[in-house]
Structure formats: C-alpha cells, structure tokens
Image (cartoon, rainbow, N blue to C red):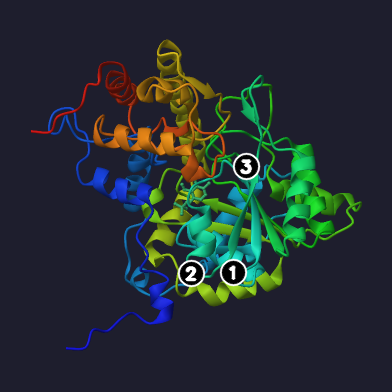
Amino acid sequence: MTKRSAPPLANRFTAEDPLFVQAIGKAFSDLYNATSNPTGYINIGVAENTLTADLMTEYIQTINKDHPVQTTDLNYTDFAGAPQFRTQLAKFFQKRLFALSNEVATVDPNNFMVFNGAGSIIESLSSSVCESGNYIMIPAPQYLAFENDLNRRFGCNMLPLYMPYNKEANEFQLNKRDIQACLDQAKSEGKKVRGFLLCNPNNPTGDIYPRELVEWIIDWCSENSIHFISDEVYGLSIFNKRNGEEFVSAGRIAHEGIASGNASHDYTHVHIVYSFSKDITLNGFRVGVLYTLNQDVLNFMRGNSYFQGVSSHTQKLLTHLLERDDLLGNFLLENNKNLTHSYNQVASALDEFKIKYVVPSAGVLMWVDLSELIKKKLNKDTIDQQDEITFWQGCFDEARVYIPAGQFFKCNVPGWFRVCFTTYSADITTLAFQRILNWVEKNERIIVN
Ligand SMILES: Cc1ncc(COP(=O)(O)O)c(C=O)c1O
C-alpha cells in the first residue's frame, strides 16, 4: 500500500508539541488529590483561578434559574457577538475595565468582537495586521502561548523585546530606550515589525505598567506605523498596589486622548484584548473579547468569527451575568480578597523557604527565582538554560510538580519559573514547594505505587 504523507500545509501542524504542553497533558491525566491520588502531579503552572469558583457557580446557577433555556437559545446567533451581549459588554467595559467617565466618551457596542477566547482573538488580530512573515514585538518574559497564537496557523513572527532584570529593584523593567533599540535592530535585519503587544498587567511578572509609559508606547507605535495590542485579561485582578500604582486601560487612554483633541492620531491602531477566563474565572466557557476603533480590523475579524464563535447559550448566560452588575461587583470584590489572601500565604511560605520572587501587583501568578536551588541540585556555581531545563524535568519527573521554566516565557535570565497561586488553596501550592525542596535537599522522590 502506498504511504500517504500529509500535504505541505497540514505538515506545518504535525510538529511535536513543545515540552511544556506534553508535560501539562501528562499532569492532567494524573493530578494530585490529597485523598484519592496523593502522589499525583501538583500543577502550579497553568493560570487558573479556582479560589472564588463556588461563588461564581452560585451566580451562574441564579442566572440559569432566572433565565432558563428557551427554544430560541437553540438557534444560531451572531458569531461575532449577539447584539444584547455587545450592549452589556459596552457597559461593562465603560464602568469596569476602562473606568471611563460618560462625559468623556460612551463605549459603542459596535466596536466589539467576540471570539472563543483571548488566544483566538490574538491569533486573528495578528493575522489581520500582519502579512505572514511580519513581526509583532512582545516584551519578555512573556505569556508562553503568545508565540504559538501568532505563528502556528498564520505565520506571524514574535519578536522578543528582552526586559533587563534589575537585581536591586528585583524587577524586569520595560523602558523606552530598549523598545526603540529593538525596533532599530529588527529594521537593520530587514524585519518588518507590524505590531507591539503589551500584556498589562503582565503575565508572568504581575507588573502593572505606568500610564505615562503606555501613552508613550501608543504614540510611538503610531509614529512607526505599528499596531498596539493591549492584552488586559488581568485588568480587574489588581490586588496589591505596591506604590499606589493604578492600572489604566489603553481603552481609557485612547478615549481620553480623543476627547482632549490634542492627539496627533486617531487611536485606530489601538486594540484591547479581554477575556472571561481570568478576572471572571470562566476559562472553560471560552469567551474572549476585542475592542477596537479600527473598522478594517473589525471587518476582517467578522469574516473569521464564523470559525471561532461562541455558543448562543454561553453568550446569553454572560449577557445576563453582565446585566447583574451587583453580582459581578460583589464577585470581583470577593475574588480580590481571595487573591490577596492566597498571595500573602504563598508569599510567606516562599519567604520561609528563602525563595526569591518578583512582587506582583495583579493577576494570579508569581515569578519566582529558583536559581539557587538549581545550583544546589546540580552542584554548580553558575547556571545556563540547559541547567534550567534539566531542573525543570527533574521537578516534573521526580518531585511530580508542574512548574514551567523561564525559557518557555522567553526569559533570557536562567533560573526563573512561573507559579500560579490560585489553582489550588495555598497549602497545596506550599506542598508543591515542599516537594521541590525535599527533592533538592534530600533527593527525595515521589514514588508512585
Ligand atoms: C495574558 C494572557 N492572554 C491570553 C490568554 C488566553 O486566554 P483565553 O483563555 O481567553 O484564551 C491567557 C491565558 O492564560 C493569558 O494569560
């Protein structure tokens, strides 16, 4: 029989999954449970927030009861966002994400696009602003799926802008000089940069970027004919204002810029990405949102929405959830308390274990420095990326902890790892670190029966 190979396009997708994706799959099939599977993998790597799940479940049940399924819910709806859903999204963005005064501007439901997840939005948006082979600049360390979202299907490239680590401040710092230098370097190599993606608040570091810097990047992008994509999926999970810092959405900056009449551009290059996965903790519902004033981008995305739409019933549920702003307000408040509490507990465990971390302002993640543990385990004075991956594999196979390594996030300083402090209660996250320490210090392995 003749062996048939995949055609060239399909071949692009037959590559093996990256190491961390393979590990997640393995961990999910054998997860830790204190009673039923105490030797299972503890997953402190995937960004999920279960801390306020009971309250959200209760609210969804209330919405379901007040608005039971009707025959019309079985039909198609606008894949790019049902009119009622867009109307509620506009109110939600106006009040909560943009925190925009009605005197300045009214958020228009027609400027929204709804897809099945922020990942889906980023993929389609990048292919709407890039030709295959163009680049989108993204500060690193960066959310580990950005490159896949940009590149896998539509061939848009990710250009890492490495944020230097300031040891004294214990921060990965984004600055104007490096942004310009990264663009200059790319140009000198003949690379066409079409976008700049800022994750604000940042995944993985939990940093919030100052308004002045975001304004500067928006103007700089306009001057350089670059689209500005603002990923704000953690915009309502601000739990630790370190220096009284405020998160300011690029949507608010754009509308205030237009209202001031002083801007030298029209903000049609600014695109805001949001999701119900993080702040609202409904990651399984698969709902992402784009807000943009760019009609061409909206038209392009509408064409794609058929392939990546959200179910009528999910849109209906979320429409009624957004209508109940009282419930949502209460949820965000409770969730914020839970984030603060869990973060404080995990942070004090890390302090006790003498593990360093970047102090986050927002989100569900901590960026921790395990370089000293790696040195101890591998008996080395200095470490490189190969040492980091060796340590990562050991953590997974022997301590049975899934904790993704910095190089998956394009971090060029070896030894950093990302921890989600909201997947489990703090005591289980602490247990994961205890397992790692026992493995490093006593060579203790988790034995599976
Ligand atoms: C910064 C960031 N953007 C986008 C996504 C994708 O979110 P969604 O579940 O809406 O696809 C994630 C998920 O972890 C994320 O952390």
> CB atoms at circles 3 and 2 under 8 Å apart?
no
> CB atoms at circles 1 and 2 under 8 Å apart?
yes
Q: Callout 2, which amino acid?
A: Arg
Secondary structure under tag 1 reads helix
| The furthest residue to the top | 352
The reply to whether the residue tagged 3 has its Cβ within 8 angstroms of ligand 1 is no
Which of 371/267 is in front? 371
Nearer-N-terminus badge (3/2) = 2
**Number of the label disc, if any, that sits on residue 400:** none
Q: CA distance from mark 3 to mark 2?
A: 25 Å
- Crowding around mark 1 (Cα neighbors within 10 Å: few <14, some 14 to 19, many 20+) is many
Residue 279 shows in this picture: no
| Residue at the image position 42 percent from the left and 80 percent from the top | 8
Which of 101/395 is in front? 395
| Residue at the image position 60 percent from the left and 64 percent from the top | 126
Q: At which x and y percent is residue 18?
A: 38, 53
Q: Callout 3, which amino acid?
A: Asn
Say if 435 sits above or below 134 in the image.
Answer: above
Mark 1 vs mark 2: in front: 2
Residue under numbered circle 3? 200
